[in-house]
Image (cartoon, rainbow, N blue to C red):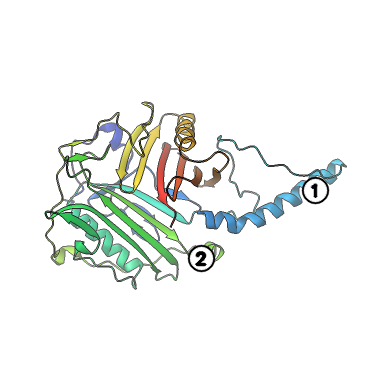
């Protein structure tokens, strides 16, 4: 029986899960023993947005001139557009080929054996970045422990994939508050994984190569013994439902938190209406970024519209929100990211 099989998941949470083998990015998948909460978080990095902005502005200026000439009037100076939080067409829809997302974040809850789940994901990363020297049989390479009980894990590697893509992979695992045996909000007392995969090569070159990665099979981690024998602490309960989800922010009761973490700080949720997600995004960012600094990008891809906002936060961080509108529902993820 796969170690992802379980019972007792609340129905309001269960319907928003994506099971093992769900695609993440560049050949990585949700490992057996874990579930992804909500859709895969996707967005265009600031590097990608800036790389295509001059081309977009040139096309828009040409379109404006053509309209003015058709109307028989002189061109008027352009003014800064009013930023609206209402979802609209793709920011780059005036280009023949709008750039696609180059950053992917999977927010996962571990339901199986955490050691095996983490090792499976490490084995997948090892075949994606074969020269990164990923260790799959020694959790001490990436995890910390106190009295042999794991308090957290973190990996941050950059390398070249078999498809010659320059990628950065960041993985964090947060088991909860070990001292109080309290799981993260909405974690169901389980460890939480945050996996971010970013294209870090030349932004335009990354858009040219759209062929899927053809990865070899990963090593079978169950065929080897993990060296530390460290223990994953068991949590007695989750943080209260009305407690802050991220950075002392408590979402309204109209939003259902699906998963959260303290390291790194994130919270992902679903809302019954798009307007509620927009209000939550505005409330969260307004208290954490300086007025006038918030950037915004809208990406329309297949049957989804993804609205991303970001701005510098306190202490060298980036405050980011990603609102995904799809046939599956409205989802909002809030992040506090390091700038590096």
What's the residue at 34%, 54% (across, down)?
A: 195
The extreme top residue here reads: 253
- Residue 66's label in the rendered image is 1
Residue at the image point whose x is 46% and y is 45% from the top: 313
- The C terminus - image quarter: bottom left
Q: CA distance from mark 2 to mark 1?
A: 33 Å
* Drawn side of residue 226 relative to residue 339, left or right: left
Res. 261 in view: yes
Quadrant location of residue 5? top left
Q: Mark 2 or 1 closer to N-term?
A: 1
* Residue 27 rendering spot, x and y as whole percentages: 37, 61
Q: Position of residue 216 (x, y in %)?
A: 32, 69
Kind of element beneath mark 1: helix
Q: Residues within 10 Å of mark 1 (few under 14, many from 20)?
A: few
Give the camera-side residue of 204 and 79: 79
Image coordinates of residue 55 in percent, x first then y, are: 66, 57
Q: Residues within 10 Å of mark 2 (few under 14, many from 20)?
A: few
Residue most toward the front?
315
Q: Position of residue 260 (x, y in %)?
A: 31, 41
Residue 99 visible here: no
Q: What is the secondary structure assignment of the residue under circle 2?
A: loop
Give the residue pinned by disc 2: 209
Task: Please give left or right for residue 42 compared with residue 298 in the image.
Answer: left
Give left or right: position of 331 versus 63: left
Tell me if 46 is positioned left or right of 29 in this view: right
> Looking at this rendering, what residue extends furthest in the right direction?
72
Q: Quadrant of residue 261?
A: top left
* Disc ID at residue 308: none
């Amino acid at each position: 029986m796969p170690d992802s099989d379980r019972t007792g998941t609340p129905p309001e949470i269960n319907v928003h899960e994506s099971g093992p083998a769900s695609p993440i990015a560049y050949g990585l998948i949700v490992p057996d023993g874990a579930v992804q909460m909500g859709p895969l978080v996707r967005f265009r990095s600031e590097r990608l947005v800036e790389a295509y902005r001059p081309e977009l502005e040139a096309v828009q200026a040409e379109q404006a001139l053509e309209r003015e000439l058709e109307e028989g009037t002189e061109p008027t100076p352009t003014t800064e557009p009013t930023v609206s939080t209402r979802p609209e067409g793709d920011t780059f829809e005036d280009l023949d080929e709008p750039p696609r997302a180059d950053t992917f974040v999977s927010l996962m809850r571990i339901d199986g054996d955490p050691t095996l789940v983490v090792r499976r994901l490490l084995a997948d990363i090892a075949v994606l970045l074969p020269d990164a020297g990923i260790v799959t049989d020694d959790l001490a390479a990436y995890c910390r422990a106190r009295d042999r009980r794991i308090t957290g894990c973190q990996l941050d590697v950059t390398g070249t994939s078999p498809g010659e893509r320059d990628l950065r992979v960041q993985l964090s695992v947060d088991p909860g508050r070990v001292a109080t045996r309290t799981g993260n909000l909405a974690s169901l007392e389980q460890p939480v994984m945050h996996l971010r995969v970013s294209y870090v090569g030349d932004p335009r070159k990354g858009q040219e190569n759209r062929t899927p990665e053809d990865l070899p099979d990963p090593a079978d981690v169950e065929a080897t013994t993990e060296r530390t024998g460290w223990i994953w602490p068991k949590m007695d309960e989750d943080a209260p439902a009305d407690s802050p989800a991220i950075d002392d922010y408590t979402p309204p009761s109209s939003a259902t938190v699906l998963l959260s973490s303290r390291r790194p700080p994130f919270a992902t949720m679903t809302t019954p209406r798009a307007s509620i997600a927009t209000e939550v995004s505005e409330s969260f960012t307004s208290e954490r970024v300086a007025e006038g600094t918030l950037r915004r990008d809208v990406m329309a891809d297949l049957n989804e519209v993804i609205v991303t906002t970001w701005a510098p936060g306190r202490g060298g961080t980036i405050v980011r929100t990603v609102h995904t509108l799809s046939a599956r529902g409205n989802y909002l993820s809030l992040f506090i990211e390091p700038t590096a």
